[in-house]
Structure formats: structure tokens, C-alpha cells
Amino acid sequence: MKKALLPDGWVKPRGYANGVAARGTQVFIAGQIGWDGQGRFQSSDFGAQAKQALANIVAVLAVAGGRPEHLVRLTWYVTDKREYVASLRDVGSAFRELIGDYDIAMSAVQVAALIEDEAKVEIEATAVIPD
């Protein structure tokens, strides 16, 4: 079970939750980047890399018996916040297709670089699979 946390009087955030309470088995997923399961980038496009990173998160979560609705936290590391903002339509579409649920605590941070030179985004995830 998971519940989005919204203090009284606060405006509901668009595209994320301020906090999430959940009970169950915790799953911690390492930062996923926009390459496929063989470690190859199929695109240099930010939106395509974000979609692949989200697909990678879903694949790792499935190994633990989890589904996208069990995600409670995502931390996005982006190399260019302007490119991220310019790609929000594609990112949102990919998110709705692969994850579907916006009741996830999220943060996005611009970083100087990621370890893989071709990577434009890396996403860490935490999920809680109900007991």
C-alpha cells in the first residue's frame, strides 16, 4: 500500500508527490541510464534516453516481483536542465506509458557529467512492494 502525502492547504504538485508513505518490501534500484540491456545507447536524444532509463527501472523492479505502481521515489540526474525541460513532453509521454503513476516523490538535479559520456540522464529508484 502506498499513499501520497499532501499537507493541508498545499497545492497538489503537478507530475510528482511531495512525499509517499508505504509499507512492504523495499527495493532500491541503482541509477539507470539510457542504454539497453546490452549496454548500448540506441539514441542521443534526451527523451529517448529517459524512456530507456525508465524501461530499465521497470525491468529491474520486475525481477523483485514489483510493478511500476510500487515505485515511491525517483531521483533524476540530468546533464542539461534546459534539454530536460525542452523534452518534458516526450519524458511525460514515456512516463505515462511505462510508469503511469505520478504519486511518486521525485527530485531532479543537474550534474556536470555522468560516468558514461553518452548518458544525458540517470534515474535512481526506490519501490515498496506491499506485503
Image (tube, rainbow, N blue to C red):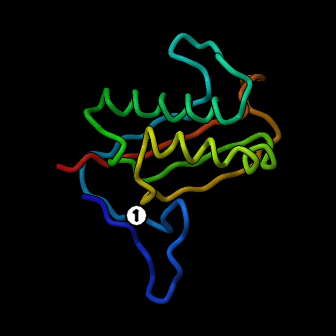
Crowding at label 1, few (<14), some or many (≥20) Cα neighbours within 10 Å?
A: some
Residue 59 coordinates in the image, percent (x, y) = 40, 27
The answer to whether 33 appears left or right of 7 in the picture is right
Relative to residue 50, is residue 26 depicted above or below? Answer: below
Relative to residue 12, is residue 70 depicted above or below? Answer: above
The answer to whether 5 appears left or right of 122 in the picture is left
Q: How many marks?
A: 1
Residue at image position (60%, 43%) is 91
Residue 95 coordinates in the image, percent (x, y) = 51, 44
Relative to residue 50, is residue 131 depicted above or below? Answer: below
Residue at image position (71%, 27%) is 119
**Quadrant of residue 53 in the image?**
top right
Q: Nearer the viewer, residue 83 or 26?
A: 83
Residue at image position (22%, 50%) is 130
Residue 60 coordinates in the image, percent (x, y) = 40, 28
Residue 11 coordinates in the image, percent (x, y) = 53, 80
Residue at image position (65%, 52%) is 108
Q: Nearer the viewer, residue 4 or 113?
A: 4
Q: Nearer the viewer, residue 70 or 101?
A: 101
The answer to whether 61 appears left or right of 114 in the picture is left
**Quadrant of residue 121 in the image?**
top right
Image quadrant holding the N terminus, namely: bottom left
Per the image, label 1 sits on a secondary structure element best described as strand
**Which residue in the structure is indicated by mark 1?**
20
Instruction: Tell me the kind of residue under disc 1.
Output: Val
